[in-house]
Amino acid sequence: MGLPKVGRASRTSHEPVPSADVPLQVLPWWWAVVIVAAVFAGGALAMWWLSVAVPIPSGPANPASGAVPSSGSVFSSGSVNADQLRLDRIKTALTVAAALAAGATLLMTLRRQMLSERAQLYNERAQRFAESEALEQRSTALYVAAADQLASDRAAVRLAGLYTLERLGQDNVKLRQTVVDVWCAYLRMPYKPPSEVLRGNAHESPEHPGAGSVVPDAAAEAERREELQVRLTAQRLLKTHLDEALGDAYWLDARAGRMVIDLVGAVLVDFSFGGCTIGRLSLSTAQFHGRTDLTETRFHEAANLRGVQFHGRADLGDVQFHGLADLRGAQFHGVADLAAAWFRGHADLHGARFHGLATLRGAQFRGRADLREAQFHGLADLHEAQFHGVTTMGGSWFGGDVNLREVQFHRRADLREVHFDGVADLSEAQFRGVADLGKASFFGSAALVGVQFRGDAGLCGTQFHAVAALDGVKFGGDADLSEVHFRGNVRMRKSRFERFAYLRGARFEGDADLRAAQFYGEAVLVGARFQGSADLRDVEFHRNADLSNAQFVQRLEMTGAVGTANVVLPRGWELSGEPGPADGLRVVTPASGWSAGQEAHRAGNTEEA
């Protein structure tokens, strides 16, 4: 039966694990008897072998008889004396016995050396254990002393406790995470910043003292200022040991893992983790006063910022979230700078509120992005932002102007019921997947110039309350603009509909400029209503198009338009025999008696209105 292979896989769960320290065993007394017996037995065996291999002649050879010595004998007749031969045999046996005794002596010497070295090893281990035990006792004593110092009423003693913990963590890798936990626990203690810090918050912040706020007691203010210095020191110590650029000062735990930061509900002032590298982060419901600097910070695990409040400026430019970034319900009362931020995992900003300027210019959302019911009270700048995963912004509200120029949605984009109260600029934006803007509301001017919808585009029930510019928009998939409502003037020059264009029930209350628009798929305008002038000059209908039931209240102009034989034109216009610029297209011209028919058509539409 073969031996099992040495390795982790060959050992079952119930097999005992061999100990590294095998106890010493005393050599039994009978081993000495065995060795002496082996020496004598070796000598006797040697003598027996010689008696068999080299026998002693029985007598001298007789020359007269003519006998010849045996060929098997190494001695010739009369050349060896029998006594001398016996003496040599005894010497040889003694030599063998001496050799065996020397071998046994050598083995005993080797064993004695091995035992000596092993005893030395045990002594060294015992010494190291004693040193380790002394270090543990010293570390425990320092830890207890530091904890007592942090509980002191004097700020200077608390500062000394923080630095004692730093020295303890720098010298002992096993205690680094514990030291960080103590610092974080201290920062989680209830605290009210001094009034000058609160006055530095954004005016929109509920923590900003108003004109009629109560003046705090001088003694209480002095105590808050002292405590502030202690907290700022704790924050600086955390940053120092979380910055990889500082080399040996950067802390890893005993398993070479990154530090875990738990600051849930902490009150932080002028907090700075810029350039730090952190493992798991918990900052839910934390309060940030003053300026918060998280620029170029790298979070390698989940980052929980749910319900956090930034009362001052928040700098998160170039921040990297490698795991889940949970900012649900987060509030930014001042400027929020997330320019070029990287969200490699799921980015959850559901219900986040930006009360001031919010810039996500060039931000990269590699995973799913959830901005449902997010509120942007000021300018929102998402210029050149890229959403690589599914993006949901349903119910979001933009109270100020919004810059979505050249933004790219690589997968499905859900913008249903989004409210744009200010100017909305989506020029050159790209929707590579399905884009759903159903029932979105644009209360300010809307610029969608050059937007590309490579998948299906849904604008069903979308409302444009001011001027809307959709020049050069390209619809690569089906375009659903049913029940869309343009309350102001709309311009869709050179727009391109590659597939189905559905404008059933669309309403154009202002002037509608669709010059040079191209419909390569079927176009349905049944029930569409143009209350202002409608300019369809140079429009191209390459497949079926039904404009018969569309209502044109004021002037309709279709000069230069072309279409196939399956195009149903409104009254006053017809397809001529003149060929168009492409095969199968014919030029649209005014019908005979156009003026009277157009007037009657306009009057009929007016009566219906």
Image (tube, rainbow, N blue to C red):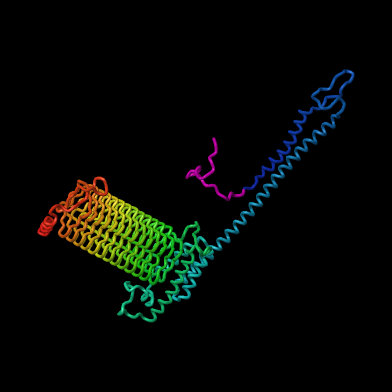
Residue positioned most to the top: 65
Q: Is residue 200 left or right of residue 161?
A: left
Residue 141 percent coordinates (x, y): 51, 67
Task: Assess whether residue 335 is covered by the magenta stretch.
Answer: no
Q: Number of callouts in the render? A: 0
Is residue 18 in the magenta section? yes
Q: Residue 451's spot in the image, x, y percent?
A: 31, 57
**The C terminus: image quadrant:** bottom left
Q: Is residue 175 visible to the viewer in this orientation of the structure?
A: no
The quarter in which the N terminus is drawn is top right
Residue 579 visible in image:
yes
Q: Is residue 200 left or right of residue 245?
A: left
- Secondary structure predominantly adopted by residues drawn in magenta: loop
Extreme right residue here?
Answer: 64
- Magenta stretch: give its range: 1-24
- Tell me where residue 74 appears, x and y as whole percent: 81, 27
Residue 217: % across, % down = 36, 81
**Viewer-closest of 474 and 411:** 474
Q: Is residue 115 above or below residue 223?
A: above
For the residue pair 591 and 23, the one nearer the viewer reads as 591
